[in-house]
């Protein structure tokens, strides 16, 4: 076995570019479709998520993550895990990547690519719902994709929104209700780990783009049936969202939408576009293992080049 490379967070992070990552993800979807497998183990609200992916021409990835929501109450990170990348040709271990590095860039980069395809190009007001680590990453990513935009952060605990907003230019904490903050936005990106929807469809206005990130289990969702009904819904992958995440399971079960109503995922990205300025678009970020692999390969290439 060759000596695998290890890419730590800080040194890896400084070599990366958000728009470069979105281009890499789009290009990787032109390769043979990924073979993927996910397993979930649960203990109450705690989750062990193991994901693997193989894309012929890129390589193999195995990623394991623990999500312990209760860690927030004792000042510990919610998510821990590990990432391994193996060579496509011989299966040898190529690299260990810092789990949080891959997760940061995969999650926010996935949403940014969706917004670049679906949001109105002249979007200037972006609302981030949530004020945690993912919200921080979203501010970085969307700032690169929409450099002229003004950002508002809404959080149930306003002081956390103020703390995050202070780290960035052109960014403020919302002084209004969530309903009022949504009404003023061109793009709404939400990263909340909730089971009951916080985004109501009756609040949405024509032309908005909604980006949903937080839900990852069958019992979780951030937007209600009316939001799904009013919007044209897109996903990053049919295979990792439609039958796996409450965001889609529940409105399909209620009849609010049909699975066949979803016009595109990244494997037919040419169809991932809005058809009018008034159309409400909604993107569900499922973040499958194939996206972890695409992101990890991009990180590894940048690491070796730079």
Image (spheres, helix red, strand yellow):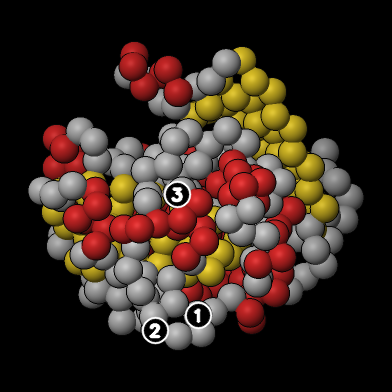
Between label 3 and label 1, give the one nearer the viewer.
3
Q: What residue appears at the point 50 percent right and 80 percent down from the top-left corner?
A: 274
- Residue 96 drawn at (x, y percent): 64, 39
Q: Which residue is mark 1?
A: 274
Q: How many marks?
A: 3
Near-viewer residue (83 or 4) = 83
Query: What is the CA distance from the residue labelled 3 to the residue labelled 1?
Result: 20 Å
- Residue 150 drawn at (x, y percent): 20, 66
Occupied quadrant, residue 262: bottom right
Badge 1 element: loop
Q: Is residue 286 left or right of residue 157?
A: right
Q: Which residue is mark 2?
A: 277
Q: What residue appears at the point 85 percent right and 46 percent down from the top-left corner?
A: 91
Q: Which residue is mark 3?
A: 223
**Badge 1, how many Cα within 10 Å: few under 14, some, many 20+?**
some
Tell me, yes or no, whether the two marked residues, 2 and 1, touch with CB atoms within 8 Å. yes
Q: Earlier in the sequence, mark 3 or mark 2?
A: 3
Query: What is the CA distance from the residue labelled 2 to the residue labelled 1?
Result: 7 Å
Badge 2 element: loop
């Amino acid at each position: 076995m060759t000596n695998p490379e290890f890419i730590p967070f800080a040194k890896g992070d400084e070599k990366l570019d958000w728009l470069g990552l979105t281009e890499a993800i789009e290009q990787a979807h032109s390769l043979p479709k990924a073979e993927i497998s996910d397993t979930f183990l649960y203990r109450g609200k705690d989750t062990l998520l193991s994901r693997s992916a193989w894309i012929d021409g890129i390589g193999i990835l195995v990623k394991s993550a623990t999500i312990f929501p209760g860690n927030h109450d004792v000042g510990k990170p919610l998510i821990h895990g590990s990432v391994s990348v193996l060579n496509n040709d011989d299966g040898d271990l190529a690299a260990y990547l810092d789990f949080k590095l891959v997760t940061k860039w995969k999650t926010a980069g996935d949403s940014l690519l969706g917004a670049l395809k679906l949001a109105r190009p002249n979007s200037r007001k972006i609302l981030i719902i949530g004020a945690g680590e993912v919200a921080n990453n979203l501010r970085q990513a969307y700032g690169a994709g929409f450099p002229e935009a003004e950002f508002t952060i809404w959080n149930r605990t306003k002081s956390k929104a103020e703390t995050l907003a202070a780290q960035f230019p052109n960014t403020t904490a919302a002084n209004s209700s969530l309903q009022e903050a949504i009404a003023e936005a061109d793009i709404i990106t939400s990263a909340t780990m909730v089971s009951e929807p916080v985004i109501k469809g009756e609040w949405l206005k024509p032309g908005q783009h909604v980006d949903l990130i937080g839900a990852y289990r069958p019992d979780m969702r951030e937007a209600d049936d009316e939001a799904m009904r009013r919007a044209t819904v897109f996903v990053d992958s049919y295979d990792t969202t439609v039958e796996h995440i409450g965001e889609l399971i529940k409105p399909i079960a209620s009849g609010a939408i049909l699975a066949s109503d979803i016009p595109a995922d990244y494997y037919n990205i040419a169809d991932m576009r809005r058809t009018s300025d008034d159309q409400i678009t909604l993107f569900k970020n499922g973040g499958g293992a194939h996206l972890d692999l695409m992101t990890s390969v991009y990180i590894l290439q940048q690491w070796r080049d730079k």
